[in-house]
Image (tube, rainbow, N blue to C red):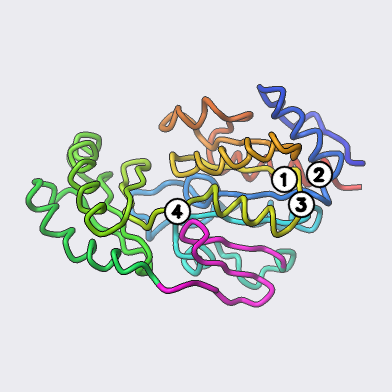
Amino acid sequence: MGRSPNTLPTPVTAAGREGLAAFLAGPGKAVVALDFDGTLADIVPDPEQARAHPDAVPALVALAPRVASVAVVTGRPAEVAVRYGGFEGVPGLERLVVLGHYGAERWDAATGTVDAPAPHPGVAAVRAGLPGLLEAEGAGQGAWIEEKGGRAVAVHTRRAADPEATFEALRAPLAALAARHGLIVEPGRMVLELRPPGVDKGAALTAYVRETGAGPVLYAGDDLGDLPAYDAVETLRGHGVPGLLVCSGGEEVPALAARADLVVPGPGAVAGLLSDLARAVTP
């Protein structure tokens, strides 16, 4: 059985305390699932410049051999998350899994390959219509489009003169465009992502936990797109699988922080928590 050092924070909920206790008592059965942007990597104005926090990979290396599984669950293409995270070929992360595009893609460190179905045809149609829509809405100079490997497309407003006003102004027209092509809009921190329905972090996490047959489950995220994963953990709790919900940051997404068992101040603190957990379960 592991020990709990004084450095571990105490979850604010009874369910979270139960989840942490179960993790410490049986780390070899635990699944650790983590968002990438805002959780393992700091949020930056240009998503292409995002990289894992310097402490993230060392923390994962320390923890991964002591738990059943570690998975990164992200809206990014799996290959991009692997590259930006610096996960490939790292000793200690041989069993790491990256579930990209909300689980539509999967990268396994054991093979170094990505498995993925064909892209939804609506994504290409939406991508073609986005420049004209942004110009028509007066957002052509402020909002910009991020390609997501043909499986989704995102519109960022962080660089606009008024990011929040631009974000709100684009929500309805983007939702209408997405609906015409069989897609949905997922809001985030100054970003609106258009992607196929039925694909989210909750579905990805549930399928992964079912596949591994493991538990308890620790999930850490920072944005509205992580709420379905929170739902999944709470559903698992209802079926007797303990869980711990961690929110990275919290100020920008109070809806996530309000549901978390534990709130830590950003990716550096997430890495610190993972390191503390690794030390707590070291024999």
Residue 11 magenta? no
- Say which of marks 4 and 1 sits in front: 4
Picture disc at residue 214: 3
In the figure, is residue 133 to the left or right of 80?
left
Residue ID at (25%, 35%): 164
| Residues at discs 4 and 2 in contact (Cβ within 8 Å) | no
Residue 256 place in picture, x, y as percent? 49, 32
Q: Give, as a three-letter code, the residue at label 1.
A: Ser
Q: Give, as a three-letter code, the residue at label 3.
A: Ala
Residue behind mark 4: 198
Residue 63 place in picture, x, y as percent? 75, 52
Front one among 206 and 158:
206
Q: Give, as a three-letter code, the residue at label 4.
A: Gly
- Quarter of the rendering containing residue 171: top left
Q: Which residues are magenta?
A: 95-118
Mark 1 vs mark 2, CA separation in Å = 6 Å
Residue 9, placed above or below residue 147 = above
Mark 3 vs mark 1, CA separation in Å = 21 Å
Residue behind mark 2: 279
- The answer to which of marks 2 and 3 sits earlier in the sequence is 3
